[in-house]
Each structure stands twice: as structure tokens, then as C-alpha cells.
Image (tube, rainbow, N blue to C red):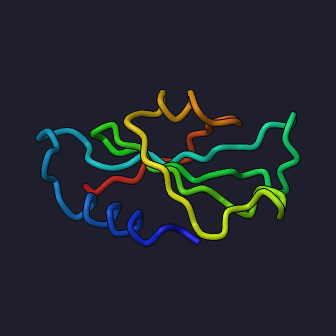
Amino acid sequence: MPHPDLSNTIERALESSEGAVVGEEFGVDIHRIIAPDEPHDFVHPVLAIVVEFDNGAVFADWNIDAWPDDEQLDAPHVSIYGSLDDLGRVTEGTLEHLTRVTGR
């Protein structure tokens, strides 16, 4: 289940062009993190859905069901990073770009 604040943040960002440069496309990039084959025993191949905002902010909505029962969190978990590079430094798996969603 997606984190409710993430959905609201995306909706607000797409409804407003505040901070966007005139003439440039305003939107978000959607990625996912695919589980590595080793060394973990993930039970689902998608570890997270990631939203990258044009300002560089990155939200990762973690699929807590991807971990074995004895390693799962009890509640949804969203992490905020300053960039995709920051996310890549601390996560397992492969970051895969899915699509770009624009507000114009």
C-alpha cells in the first residue's frame, strides 16, 4: 500500500508549476528497485517504487512484503533521499526506470 503522504506530494507537484523553469517539462520519474539474486532471500522481485522529483528529491516506497515474514516491518515505510545517487549508495538491488509522468 503506497504511503498516503507520497501520493499527496505527487498530486500537489503535478498540479503546480511552482519551481519549474518555463518551457521545460515538469513532472516526475518513476523507477523501481528489483531485488538482487544473492545474498538475500526476497519473496517478491520488486523491493520499492521510487519517485524522483525534478528538484532532485527521491521518495522510495518500500514493498515490505518483499522481505521474508521474520524480516518485515509492521507498517508501510517511505524513505526520502536527496538524489538517486544517494539511494543507490544505501540499497540492494537494481534501479530500473519505468516512466516519466508530466504535469503539462
Where residue 67 appears, as percent x and y from the top left, is 78, 56
14, 23: nearer the viewer: 14
Looking at the rendered structure, the number of numbered marks drawn on it comes to 0
Q: Is 27 on the left or on the right of 70, as rendered?
A: left
Which residue is located at x 71 percent, y 52 percent? 46
Q: Looking at the rendering, which quadrant does residue 74 occupy?
A: bottom right
Q: Is 74 on the left or on the right of 26, as rendered?
A: right
Which residue is located at x 69 percent, y 36 percent? 92
Where residue 86 appears, as percent x and y from the top left, is 47, 30
95, 82: nearer the viewer: 82
Vertical position of residue 37 compared to residue 69: above or below: above
Q: Is 50 on the left or on the right of 103, as rendered?
A: right
Where residue 57 appears, as percent x and y from the top left, is 35, 42
Where residue 44 appears, as percent x and y from the top left, is 80, 56
- Rendered-image quadrant of the C terminus: bottom left
Which residue is located at x 60 percent, y 56 percent? 62
- Rendered-image quadrant of the N terminus: bottom right
Which residue is located at x 49 percent, y 50 percent? 79
